Image (spheres, rainbow, N blue to C red):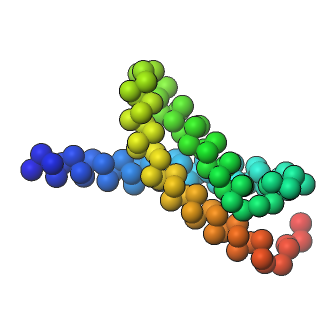
Amino acid sequence: MAGLGDSMTAIAFALGGLIPTGIIAALFVWVMGLFTRLSAARKPVVRSAVANGASLVACMLVAVFGLGDRSLAAFGAVFVAYFPAQVVWFVVWFFVLKRRKGAAPRDR
């Protein structure tokens, strides 16, 4: 039964990682939307990749400094915990931005 507890902990970390990575990714996607004059910010894959990469780094830094252990092993553990969640948000934001690009522009 020790293996079951380890897998449940991994699932809990993955699901728990969805919340902070999703919030920070949404913030970075919104901020990049303010700079739509840049041609790269208009492309959904570039905008999603940059926003989610920045979100992953920000979440990792907050988590490692929050743990109080600034070792390389802590960065690795936090990366393993947050990377799957960040991939989920990358895919979600890619399709959201791709759908928005084809939609009619909104009045501001």
Q: Is residue 100 left or right of residue 81?
A: right
User: Residue 91 sits in which quadrant?
Assistant: bottom right
Pinpoint residue 1: horizontal percent, then vertical percent. 9, 50
Residue 68 seen in this snapshot: no
Give above or below for 42 relative to 65: below
The residue depicted at 36 percent of the width and 47 percent of the height is 13
The residue depicted at 49 percent of the width and 26 percent of the height is 65
Q: Is residue 21 left or right of residue 107?
A: left
The residue depicted at 77 percent of the width and 77 percent of the height is 102
Front-most of residues 30 and 42: 42
User: Residue 107 sits in which quadrant?
Assistant: bottom right
Front-most of residues 19 and 72: 72
User: Residue 45 sits in which quadrant?
Assistant: bottom right
Number of labels in the image equals 0
The image quadrant where one finds the C terminus is bottom right
Pinpoint residue 41: horizontal percent, then vertical percent. 80, 55
Give above or below for 102 relative to 46: below
Q: Is residue 3 left or right of residue 56?
A: left
Q: Is residue 104 left or right of residue 100?
A: right
Pinpoint residue 32: horizontal percent, then vertical percent. 77, 51
Give above or below for 106 relative to 38: below
The residue depicted at 64 percent of the width and 64 percent of the height is 94
Residue 5 seen in this snapshot: yes
Pinpoint residue 11: horizontal percent, then vertical percent. 32, 53
